[in-house]
Amino acid sequence: MAGNLPLVGFHDLLYVLAARHKAMIKLSDKDPYLLPWVAQHWISICPSLSAAISYTNKFEGFDAVIATGSNNSARYFDYYFRSYPHLLRQNRNGVAVLNGQESVDDLRKLAKDIFLFFGLGCRNVSKIYVPGAMISVPGMKG
């Protein structure tokens, strides 16, 4: 699991379990607590999931791979997992498309998202598209 954002691999785990596969998870050193906490709560609701979720520190004994990382790490993963079915995610760019009707609060929330998470996740906003004319925001100069 990538560890750049908390629970960034949540959807991968959810889809693996929904497809009735077993999930062997190698946690990131940067996010070792939250996903196991969520998984433990799922297990408390559906005890049969305990047989479908395990954790490992080594890549061995698996049938297929889902991995997320940079473009460079994807090249490494592609080579390392070349003989297994795999889904490898690389860098992606998130965009914000503004229509000129955004409130000051909307723009503040967008700015908060950009400055808190820029560069940490592959889908965080890194480009903003604005209408043809500059948007005039009350209280902002320029």
Image: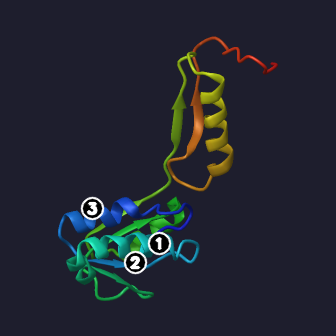
Label 1 crowd bin: few (<14), some (14–19), many (20+), radius 10 Å: few
Rendering colour mode: rainbow
In terms of image quadrants, where is residue 77? Answer: bottom left
Label 2 crowd bin: few (<14), some (14–19), many (20+), radius 10 Å: few
**Residue at 82 percent of width and 19 percent of height:** 141
**Gap in Å between the C-alphas at discs 1 and 3?**
24 Å
Disc 2 element? helix
**What is the three-letter code of the residue carrying label 1?**
Tyr
Q: Pointer 3: what residue?
A: 15
Query: Between residues 43 and 83, which one lies in front from this camera angle?
Result: 43
**Gap in Å between the C-alphas at discs 3 and 2?**
23 Å
Query: Between residues 27 and 86, which one lies in front from this camera angle?
Result: 27
Contact, mark 2 vs mark 1 (Cβ under 8 Å):
yes
**What is the three-letter code of the residue carrying label 3?**
Tyr
Q: Pointer 2: what residue?
A: 80
The correct choice, above or below, for 49 with respect to 3 in the image is: below
**Residue at 39 percent of width and 62 percent of height:** 10
Question: Can you give x and y, in whole percent of width and height, for residue 98 in the image?
Answer: 55, 23
Question: Can you give x and y, in whole percent of width and height, for residue 42 in the image?
Answer: 31, 70
Query: Between residues 87 and 72, which one lies in front from this camera angle?
Result: 87
Disc 3 element? helix
Furthest toward the right, the residue is: 141
Q: Pointer 1: what residue?
A: 76
Q: Earlier in the sequence, mark 3 or mark 2?
A: 3
